[in-house]
Image (tube, rainbow, N blue to C red):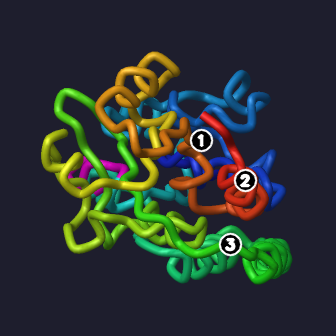
Amino acid sequence: MQLVSLVPSITELLYTLGLEQEVTGITKFCIHPQTWFRTKTRIGGTKTLDMAKITALQPDLIIANKEENIKEQVEALQDRFPVLVTDVNNYTEAISMIRTVGTATLRTANAAALISAIEKAFAALRIPAQKTAAYLIWKDPWMTVGGDTFISDMMQRAGFKNLYAPRRRYPVVNLPELQALAPEYLLLASEPYPFKEKHRVALQRLFPGAKILLADGTLFSWYGSRMLEAPAYFLALQKTEP
């Protein structure tokens, strides 16, 4: 079986499932594992797929994602190859996706073992009372996450009450609006926008009463095998001093 992954987090999942030989193509954003990033054929970006490169690989299965990939590009691939389109908006759907991918790639037992480990890690997670928070993913314009996203679900499990939970997907916000909400925490994601210390310092002046932290975006947004690392990270994040 020859596989092409169009999603960074799923590429890492395929690696965890032991599909070293089967995976032939990945995107330029599939940076984990580094060995694959250096050796596998790169078939463009998640939203700028190189159709010619994918066709040349003649995959038996392409794995895409409803949110991360462009609908028209995925549909064009579906005309020529089998495509598994995943759709993950919360923890439960992430677990289901791992099981589905395991079945589709003939790694059912590996997927079951991974799911068991993830479930045990989250079951053991003990977080103190939730703190109000906003999770910023972009600036110019400032953008956050709504309550119907995987990130929002992870925020809740990490001990943060998403102030934008009533909103959908990835709303644009203005800073005066956010200041009025008086968040106890601001989480600045490392991706897709690469927030740095300079951004934290600048925002701290505007939100003197908030604890502002730089957050590893992969541990809030990468559904798949990286979920194994999330519970320990969430505990450590609560103890982080800015």
Apparent side of residue 188 relative to residue 40 in the rendered image (left or right)? left
| Viewer-closest of 239 and 77 | 239
- Residues tagged 1 and 2 counted as in contact (Cβ below 8 A): yes
Quick check: 83 above or below 134? below
Q: CA distance from mark 1 to mark 2?
A: 9 Å
- How packed is label 3: few (under 14 Cα within 10 Å), some, or many (20 or more)? some
Q: Which picture quadrant has residue 48?
A: top left
Instruction: Tell me if residue 208 can be seen.
Output: yes
Which amino acid type is marked by label 1? Asp
Task: Find disc 1 in the rendering and name its residue.
Answer: 216
Which residue sits furthest front? 209
Apparent side of residue 207 relative to residue 96 in the rendered image (left or right)? left
Q: Secondary structure at mark 1?
A: loop
Task: Find disc 3 in the rendering and name its residue.
Answer: 127
Task: Find disc 2 in the rendering and name its residue.
Answer: 233
Q: Which picture quadrant has residue 175?
A: top left
Q: Earlier in the sequence, mark 1 or mark 3?
A: 3
| Viewer-closest of 102 and 168 | 168
Q: Which residues are magenta?
A: 68-74
Which amino acid type is marked by label 3? Ile
In percent of the image, x 65 and y 79: which residue is there?
Answer: 99
In percent of the image, x 53 and y 44: which residue is there?
Answer: 217
In percent of the image, x 66 and y 55: which residue is there?
Answer: 238
